[in-house]
Amino acid sequence: MLEALGLDARVEGVYREMLVDPAGGVAGMGVRLGLSEEQVREALDRLVDLELLTASRENTGGLRTVSPEAGLELLLRRQEEELIRRQQELALSKAAAARAVAEYAVLRPNTETDGAERLVGLDAIQSRLEVLARGLTRECMAIMPGGAQSQASLDASRPLDEDALARKVGMRVVYQDSARNDPATLAYALWTVERGGQVRTSPVLPPRLVIFDRATAVVPIDPANSRLGALCSTAPGIVASLVTLFEQTWGTAAPLGAARERADADGITAGERELLKLLACGLTDEAAGKRLGVSLRTVRRQMSGLMERLDATSRFEAGLRAARRGWL
């Protein structure tokens, strides 16, 4: 009857016996209740913990039963205090959960706001790309910076591109010039062209970009780390601006079959010209290499060759001589 107050049937029975005959002894109480002496002592300890039994002032070492009015009122007050404490903890937990939801809302996959869908993680990005690729009806435009593409990226793209090309969807892709030097990426680009797609390359490219039917654009949240996620936008203004960026990039890029690295009339290749421009802007060799999609070793080799052709003993002098020749 008093389980809600923390007294099970055994403890309540011992409490009743103590109210009736506090001097009956453990053994006699056990006989009347059908309990072992150990069980009776455990129940007495529990009653002491609940303050329903307290030390006797008359009998040294004995116990005094607290009246039900005082004892049970004390238990009720404790439960009320515990309930208030738990309600306070619950309120604090709700507040903490609300803060966490607000803080992590920007990280939640497929969170759409004002025509922009945030895709967190490679799996979320791939899932969205699969849906968009299967829904293509007219054209797909893509800018793929970074030179060599990872094998995992190529493997994930192949079935989507193959399906779109088989349905005669127009496909235009711009890779970085350095992709021509990577066998796997070059083979994929040639595979795309063989199936009706168009591929061009350029020395320097803007961040990664894919546009579906001129209606939906997917760009990385952080161009320096594609694993952080992507933004998928259908906002007409944003998509139109990205289409313009693509068309400008496409217009200055060279078809895959063209000899991109052939020197122009000034005796300098497009890649070398871009390298000089990047270094003249203050970029380090490593940063310039990342923009061009080439290794640090390649940057230094190309710069060494340029200095030799310019007959310069320092990079500063090389910059001046390149400017005089109109290379910058």
Image (tube, grey):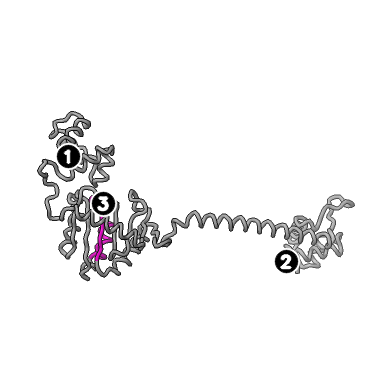
Q: Residue at x 34, y 53 (%)?
A: 226
Reading the image, the residue beneath label 3 is: 145
Q: Is residue 13 magenta?
A: no
Residue type (three-letter) at the residue carrying disc 3: Pro
CA–CA distance between discs 3 and 1?
Answer: 24 Å
On screen, residue 227 above or below 29: above
Q: Nearer the viewer, mark 3 or mark 1?
A: 1
Query: Is residue 151 at all visible to an observer of this figure?
Result: no
The answer to which quarter of the image holds residue 15 is bottom right
CA–CA distance between discs 2 and 1?
Answer: 91 Å
The answer to which quarter of the image holds residue 81 is bottom right
User: In the orientation shown, which residue stands out farthest toward the top?
Assistant: 313
Left or right: where does residue 3 sit relative to residue 294? right
Q: Quick one: 315 or 323, which is closer to the camera?
A: 323
Reading the image, the residue beneath label 2 is: 3
Q: Which element type, helix, strand or loop, lies under badge 2?
A: helix
Q: Residue at x 78, y 66 (%)?
A: 13
Report x, y in % for residue 178: 20, 48
Q: Nearer the viewer, mark 2 or mark 1?
A: 1
On screen, residue 288 above or below 11: above
Residue type (three-letter) at the residue carrying disc 2: Glu
Reading the image, the residue beneath label 1 is: 327
Which quadrant does the N terminus fall into?
A: bottom right
Which quadrant does the C terminus fall into?
A: top left
